[in-house]
Image (spheres, rainbow, N blue to C red):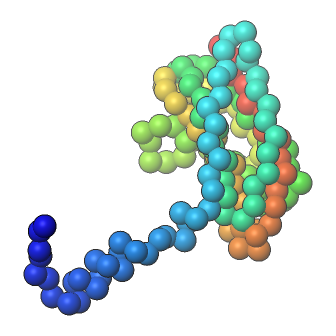
């Protein structure tokens, strides 16, 4: 067994880091892979999110294909973002651009559509029922 001789403050800090769970980790994230192929170019899902919970739908696309996403919801603070794998900035931010997206994909790879509630609704533990339609075409 390895014994480290650390000052008490450092030991307490390390113990606090090990045994402290970040607030966001308790919130569930629903993850689902979506297959959009030439034969099936649209996919619809229905779901519910509550509070800080999110739902993530990952699909694979090719550069130049047109991705379309439309969100219908009963909650005015319910939006979606689109992220491209490996990129720091979102390709689309629903809270500033609305609940409908249509554009050509910039590169081959994975794209994730994340459905979420804005902080004002999440703090109130609001519930959103939504339907999300995703399509991909050449």
Residue at 22% x, 84% y is 10
Task: Give residue 65's quadrant in the image.
Answer: top right
Residue furthest toward the bottom?
A: 8
Q: In the depicted view, which residue is nearer to us: 6 or 60?
A: 6
Is residue 45 depicted above or below 108 in this figure?
Answer: below
Residue at 84% x, 51% y is 129
Is residue 125 depicted above or below 102 in this figure?
Answer: below
The C terminus: image quadrant: top right
The N terminus: image quadrant: bottom left
Left or right, 119 with reference to 48:
left
**Residue 82, horizontal then vertical, whole percent:** 61, 42
**Residue 58, horizontal then vertical, whole percent:** 59, 34
Left or right, 47 with reference to 88:
right
Q: In the depicted view, which residue is nearer to us: 79 or 6?
A: 6
Residue at 64% x, 37% y is 32
Task: Give residue 74's quadrant in the image.
Answer: bottom right
Left or right, 18 with reference to 132:
left
- Residue 15 visible to the viewer: yes
Left or right, 65 with reference to 49:
left
**Residue 44, horizontal then vertical, whole percent:** 79, 31
Residue at 67% x, 20% y is 36
């Amino acid at each position: 067994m390895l014994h480290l001789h650390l000052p008490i403050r450092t030991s307490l800090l390390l113990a606090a880091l090990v045994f402290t769970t970040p607030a966001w980790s308790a919130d569930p994230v629903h993850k689902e892979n979506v297959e959009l192929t030439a034969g099936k170019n649209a996919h619809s899902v229905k779901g519910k999110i509550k509070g800080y919970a999110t739902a993530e739908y990952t699909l694979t696309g090719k550069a130049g294909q047109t991705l379309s996403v439309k969100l219908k919801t009963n909650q005015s603070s319910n939006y979606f973002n689109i992220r491209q794998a490996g990129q720091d900035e979102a390709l689309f931010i629903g809270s500033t651009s609305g609940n409908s997206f249509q554009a050509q994909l910039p590169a081959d790879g994975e794209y994730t559509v994340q459905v979420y509630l804005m902080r004002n609704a999440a703090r109130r533990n609001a519930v959103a029922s939504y339907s999300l339609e995703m399509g991909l075409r050449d």
